[in-house]
Image (cartoon, rainbow, N blue to C red):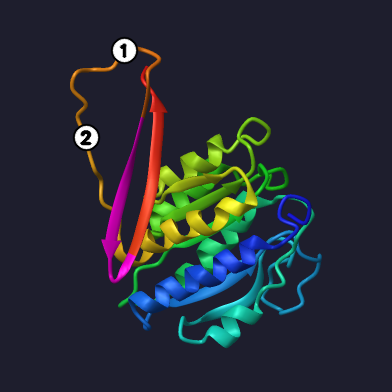
Amino acid sequence: MEWNDPNRVRVTASKDFIRLLLSNNNLHKAGIFDFAGSSGDANGDGIDDYYLRVLQDFVYVSDTTGLFTADSATESGGTPLYLSFWYLLDYVYNRRESEYGHAILVLTDGEDNKSDPITSDSVINKAKNYGIPIYAVGLGDTGSVDFTELKRVANSTGGVFANAVEANALETVFNSMGFGLSQGYSKVIAKITPIPGTGSSIFGKIKITSGGNTLTKIWQFVAP
């Protein structure tokens, strides 16, 4: 991501995400992991660091010192996305605490290219079996990066997918994810009368306030 996020907006967005979790409940826990790191098994967990590297194990979100200094995620390399999910799901599940809900939030700017024989279906089945939803953020223009499978993984496991076309959108996207992970999601259904004609551009704004925080989001689509 050193080329499409040279200012490391993802780090600022991630810290704001932690702050949002903390403002909601200081008993939340978070861990930070990455993939495509160096080959080898530096921490002796039996997993090649290329597929799963622990930058900060699970701690209370009040431990901002530990979480905020774990910002050395790999900026380049391959994308063993599904194999990384495979190992991380086991890691989270084996460390689960009964009083907590568990979820994974991933940021990637590429399509999986090094996970054979693990597939998106393998990940979906394991995540559903473990009861761990996957939330995903795809960085990049969907015209050049195909996030279709990643979106399917998120939707199929009970998570949410969001696309940040440019790095500057990451703070807004992570803020939205923070609201959802800490307080849940609400579905809003609106009926438009009269029905707009095919090809009409429809847009609006929704403003949500919860827990002392306010999020405003503009939505837009073209009528089918």
Tell me the residue at 51%/87% (across/down). 63
The disc label shown at residue 197, or none: 1
Residue 48 drawn at (x, y percent) = 73, 66
Mark carried by residue 190: 2
- Whether 162 is among the magenta residues is no
Quadrant including the N terminus: bottom right
Residue 206 lies in the magenta-colored region: yes
Let me know if residue 2 appears in the view: yes
Q: Nearer the viewer, residue 49 or 145?
A: 145
Q: Which quarter of the picture shows residue 140?
A: top right
Q: Nearer the viewer, residue 22 or 96?
A: 22
x and y percentages locating residue 97 in the rendered image: 38, 78
Is residue 95 visible to the viewer in this orientation of the structure? Answer: no
Task: Tell me: 196 left or right of 178.
Answer: left
Task: Give the residue type at disc 2.
Answer: Ala
- The chief SS type of the magenta part is strand
Q: Position of residue 71 (x, y in %)?
A: 67, 73
Residue 39 occupies which quadrant of the picture? bottom right
Work out whether mark 2 precedes mark 1 in sequence or the reverse, and give the earlier one: 2
Q: Is residue 4 above or below residue 103?
A: above
Whole-percent x and y of residue 101?
A: 34, 69
- Picture layout, residue 189 above or below residue 69: above
Residue 76, quarter of picture:
bottom right
